[in-house]
Amino acid sequence: MAEIGTMHYLVVAAMLFILGVVGVVTRRNVVVILMSIELILNAVNLNLIAFSRLHGLHGQIFSIFVIVDAAAEAAVGLGIVIAFFRNKETVNVDEVDLLKW
């Protein structure tokens, strides 16, 4: 049985990060973009924990800060999406022109 090393964690984190970036770049729905940003932040969390396991640091503390930040970002983002949907009745990013003159 092979031991799961740091490289395995880094590969999974890289795949999560790439999936999140692809979701942010290719999607037009604001909710899907926010979910893709959450995937990117989870990849960062996985990297922090992997490096803390490797070097004996306190990466879990940094990971908790990132999770709290992601929760706050999701709450604010969802509030913006709800307000936008009430005004425009869509969540398409291409329709965001409320600040145009």
Image: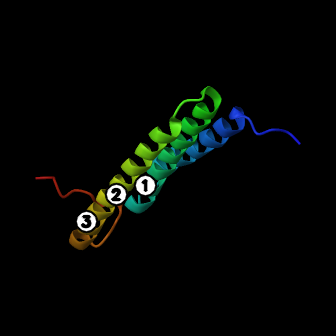
Residue shown at 69%/33% (left/top)? 6
The disc label shown at residue 94, or none: none
Dot 2, how many residues are within 10 Å of its Cα: few (below 14), some (14-19), or many (20+)?
Answer: few
Label 3 sits on residue: 84
- Circles 1, 3 touching at the beta carbon (< 8 Å): no
* Residue 50 position in % (x across, y down): 61, 36
The residue located at (67%, 38%) in the rendering is 11
Q: Is residue 78 left or right of residue 59?
A: left
Q: What is the secondary structure assignment of the residue under circle 2?
A: helix
Residue 43 vs 30, above or below: the answer is above
Mark 2 vs mark 1, CA separation in Å: 9 Å
Q: Which residue is mark 1?
A: 33
Numbered disc total: 3
Q: Name the residue carrying label 2.
A: 93
Q: Residues within 10 Å of mark 3 (few under 14, many from 20)?
A: some
Residue that extends furthest to the right in the rendered view of this protein: 1
Q: Residues within 10 Å of mark 1 (few under 14, many from 20)?
A: many
Q: Are marks 2 and 1 in contact (CB under 8 Å)?
A: yes
Q: Quadrant of residue 29?
A: bottom left
Q: CA distance from mark 1 to mark 3?
A: 15 Å
**What's the residue type where badge 1 is placed?**
Ile
> Tag 1 or tag 2, which sits nearer the N-term?
1
Amino acid beneath label 2? Val
